[in-house]
Amino acid sequence: MALTRPLLITMGDPAGIGPEIIAKLFRDSPAELAACVVVGDVSTLRRAAQLTSGGAVDVPVALLESLADWQAVPLRCLPVLQQCALPEIVPYGRISALAGQAAADCIVWAARAVLAGQAAAMVTAPIHKEALAAAGGWAARFPGHTEMLQAEAAAFLGQPVSEVPVRMMLANDELKTVLVSIHLSLRRAIDAVTFDNVLQTLRITHSAVGASLGRSPRIAVAGLNPHAGEGGLFGDEELVVISPAIAAARAEGLDVHGPFAPDTVFMRARHAPGKAGEFDVVVAMYHDQGLIPVKYLGVEQGVNVTLGLPLVRTSPDHGTAFDIAGSGRADAASLLAAIRMARRLSV
């Protein structure tokens, strides 16, 4: 279905692979990039377009005067809205305060445009968290995209951040996982496994995944401890926190099951070729518990979706890949999957 408003792609860290994979998609998948506008730095995107063409300019880069010009952009032309200040093009593969600030400025502008109804959704290319911290000021307050978008949504709604709970979902065609906590140290993540946080995650998962499926999702819950605590032998969080939260969710009518042993629940939920999984989504207790299984199945197809926001935001499930930035070898498949999902969720 054609979009009636543009879909915004933020360029990510200009020293990473974000601009490169964006340029590759405009070159190789122009029909799927129709109605997409890049929020970034025009010089950075022109460098990326030259890189992906091997020196010949196969992808023209157009500087838009305003977002309203998006419908006039022809296929295979990469439209850019200059919404950051980069006095110079930053070197590939280096952490830079300039790059971190530029990436943050683009994210905030795009979020505000989507919240205001000027755009349909946003897809974010990868940022580097150390560059974000190096930028200092307001940008350094946020460890990543999720927290920054949560703050923008709260400001838009006129509510405190605590009243706009968000969760990260990583998804591909075979597996979906939602995280109770996101960017925390493992020690702090364990402390975040509380009754309220688990129940809130189940509610957000039910609402968001159910909306995309058109029915109540079957939710599996991973335990925190080995073997889901083995009846309290290896930890009692399953008994005193997770199981009561599951019971409360089921009392509200949610189709929730568990807690299950973390080393098997993801296999049970996987929708493998020719074999449907037992569940639609798994709620994991912390970042790596949930992300490792999805990424193992294929980084190139994984999509990060922020749940709980009053806007659609997706991203590829990989990072800035500083080690290969500027080499022309970056794979754009995950970004394309993120764009496809953003389209589906925004129509």
Image (tube, rainbow, N blue to C red):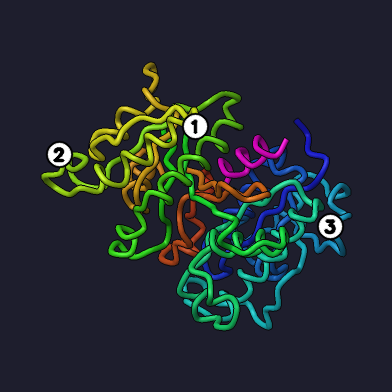
Residue 19 in view of the camera: no
Which residue is found at the position 26% from the left and 43% from the top? 238
Q: Which residue is mark 1?
A: 252
- Judge depth for marks 1 and 3 and give the one in front: 1
Instruction: Report if the CB atoms under discs 1 and 3 are less than 8 Å apart.
Output: no
- Judge depth for marks 3 and 2 and give the one in front: 2
Magenta stretch, main secondary structure, is: helix
Q: Nearer the viewer, residue 309 or 244?
A: 244
Q: Which residue is mark 3?
A: 67
Q: Amino acid at mark 3?
A: Leu
Residue 55 has which mark?
none
Percent position of residue 68, x then y: 88, 55
Which residue is found at the position 88% from the left and 49% from the top? 72
Instruction: Report if the CB atoms under discs 3 and 2 are less than 8 Å apart.
Output: no
Q: Nearer the viewer, residue 248 or 101?
A: 248
Circle 2 Cα neighbour tier, 10 Å, few/some/many (<14 / 14–19 / ≥20):
some
Q: Quadrant of the N terminus?
A: top right
Quadrant of residue 175 within the rendered picture: top left
Which residue is found at the position 77% from the left and 58% from the top? 113
State which region is magenta: 335-347
Q: Nearer the viewer, residue 30 or 207?
A: 207
Q: Is residue 34 left or right of residue 226?
A: right
What secondary structure is marked by label 2?
helix
Q: Which residue is mark 2?
A: 230
| Residue 129 in magenta stretch | no
